[in-house]
Image (cartoon, rainbow, N blue to C red):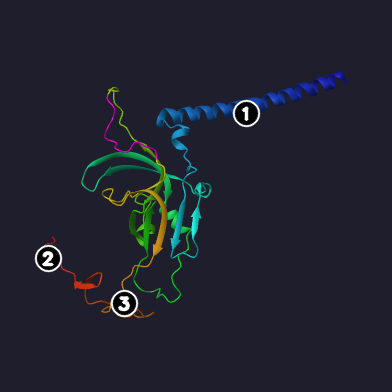
């Protein structure tokens, strides 16, 4: 009886030992993979992980089926993406290079249901206007189509984190001063990587408004559902003034 118990104990000990060896080897493999990733990329959990802060809020309203209000908890349900930019002012001044973490505007608009008035002619060739509004009331205007019919590289981003990118240098005594923006983001920054400059970038975005472009004019034909859209030419409408488009002086 003692012999059987001894054999059973040895067998269980061998099984536990083998299991521990497998787990230890798995742990070593993970550590080796982690070390290899660190050696090749220099990535750290701090560089990879980013979350929307507690003070970030966003509202989407206008021609929508309801008013959408997002707090930091719901905003963190969106998967963040990362983007590097080289930013130039409208005057041509270099403003720096940055790495942003943020939410693509496309992902937000895909979850928002537009709602046009019941009497609207849905087949008219008009896009929605999407206006981004900052906390101070500044605005940037886009068309719904340019924000949604885009690829991943050119998609506009509502960034909640910005890290200045600094080139490696042996001269550590001289700070890199070409990055003009060094402060952390306190609110969403609208980043437009497809733009040639930062003219339509906007800081501290708190609201997005969808609306129809107004183009009522006595000389324009009445909108009727189902009619074919044709035009003998192109005209420019500015306020109450309508004039033919001229291309004089254009290459």
Residue 163: % across, % down: 37, 37
Looking at the picture, tell me which residue is in the foreground, 1 or 133: 133
**Which dot, 2 or 1, sits closer to the camera?**
2
Label located before the other in sequence (1 or 3): 1
- Among all residues in the image, which is located at the extreme left? 249
Indicate the position of residue 157 as horizontal and vertical percent values.
39, 49
Q: Residue at x 43, y 77 (%)?
A: 119
**Helix, strand or loop under label 3:** loop
Give the residue number, with chain letter if any, for mark 3.
229
Crowd rating for badge 3 (residues with CA inside 10 Å; few <14, some 14–19, many 20+): few
Which residue is the site of mark 2? 248
Pointers 2 and 1 in contact (CB under 8 A)? no
> What residue is pinned by disc 1?
23
In this picture, is 105 found above or below 16?
Answer: below
User: In the picture provided, is 129 more to the left or to the right than 11?
Assistant: left
Residue ID at (34%, 53%): 138
Q: Earlier in the sequence, mark 2 or mark 1?
A: 1
Q: Quadrant of residue 164?
A: top left
Q: Which structural element holds mark 2? A: loop
Q: Residue furthest front?
A: 136
Above/below status of 174 relative to 209: above
Disc 3 or disc 2, which is closer to the eye? 2
Where is residue 205 shown, x and y percent of the image? 39, 50
- 129 relative to 26 in the view: left or right: left
């Amino acid at each position: 009886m003692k012999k059987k118990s001894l054999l059973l104990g040895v067998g269980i000990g061998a099984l536990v030992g083998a299991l521990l060896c497998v787990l230890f080897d798995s742990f070593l493999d993970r550590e080796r993979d982690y070390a290899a990733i660190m050696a090749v990329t220099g990535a750290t959990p701090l560089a990879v992980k980013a979350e929307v802060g507690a003070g970030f809020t966003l509202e989407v309203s206008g021609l929508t089926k309801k008013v959408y209000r997002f707090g930091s908890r719901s905003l963190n349900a969106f998967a963040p993406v990362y983007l590097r930019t080289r930013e130039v002012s409208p005057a041509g001044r270099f403003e720096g290079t940055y790495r942003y973490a943020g939410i693509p505007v496309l992902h937000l608009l895909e979850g928002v249901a537009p709602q046009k008035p019941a009497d609207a002619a849905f087949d008219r060739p008009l896009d929605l206007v999407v206006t981004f509004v900052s906390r101070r009331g500044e605005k940037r205007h886009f068309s719904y189509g340019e924000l949604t019919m885009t690829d991943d590289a050119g998609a506009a981003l509502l960034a909640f984190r910005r890290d200045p990118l600094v080139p490696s240098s042996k001269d550590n005594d001289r700070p890199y001063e070409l990055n003009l923006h060094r402060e952390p983001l306190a609110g969403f920054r609208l980043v437009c990587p497809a733009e040639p400059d930062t003219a339509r970038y906007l800081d501290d975005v708190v609201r997005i408004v969808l609306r129809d472009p107004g183009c009522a004019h006595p000389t324009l034909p009445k909108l009727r559902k189902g009619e074919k859209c044709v035009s003998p030419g192109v005209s420019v409408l500015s306020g109450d003034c309508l004039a033919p488009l001229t291309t004089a002086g254009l290459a």
